[in-house]
Image (cartoon, helix red, strand yellow):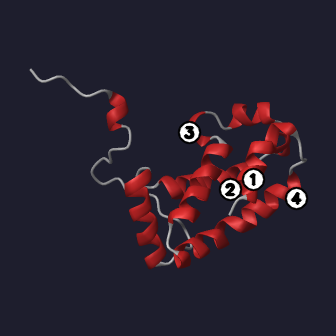
Amino acid sequence: MPRRRPDRARVHRRRPGQSIPQVTGASAPTAGAIARFERDHFHPGAVARALRCWSAFVHGPIRAITDSESCHYFYGGWDEPDWCRGILRDAQRALPAKAARELRALVRPLDELYLTRAIPAPGNASLRELLDTP
């Protein structure tokens, strides 16, 4: 009898009828470029999920933005803001120029909202570095 693969190997496998999350507001060419990036580097829907996570964090409670410890309480696991913003940064760097510009236009308002709400502190220095790098 063949050995079954570990569950972790099947984490991102789609079920029949399950749709892949798409980046809302992206044009068809940009969506195609994002899909190729996800296929090569992450998993289908990773950029859309990261954008949703980053948006939820930025629009979330102010205590989660200002206190790094409470941030992990609200956004544990894959949905950590540093991880999500890192995926968006990697996508912006790897996508073709036009697609990267379009994704940057979707992410920039969220970054600006974060910067207006967050107080510079050592706890959020790594997240601020992600925003400073293009």
Q: Label 3 sits on what residue type?
A: Trp
Q: Which mark is residue 78?
A: 3
Which residue does the numbered mark 1 point to in the structure image? 58
Q: Are marks 2 and 3 in contact (CB under 8 Å)?
A: no
Which residue does the numbered mark 2 point to in the structure image? 55
Q: In which image quadrant can residue 20 be found? A: bottom left
Q: Are marks 2 and 4 in contact (CB under 8 Å)?
A: no
Q: Residue at x 37, y 56 (%)?
A: 39
Give coordinates of residue 66: x percent, y percent: 85, 42
Label 3 and label 1: CA atoms lie apart by 16 Å
Give coordinates of residue 42: x percent, y percent: 44, 50
Whichever of labels 1 and 4 marks the residue nearer the N terminus, that label is 1
Q: Label 1 sits on what residue type?
A: Val
Whichever of labels 2 and 3 marks the residue nearer the N terminus, that label is 2
Quarter that holds the N terminus: top left
Residue 32 visible in the displayed image: yes
Give the vertical position of 17 relative to 98 (above or below): above
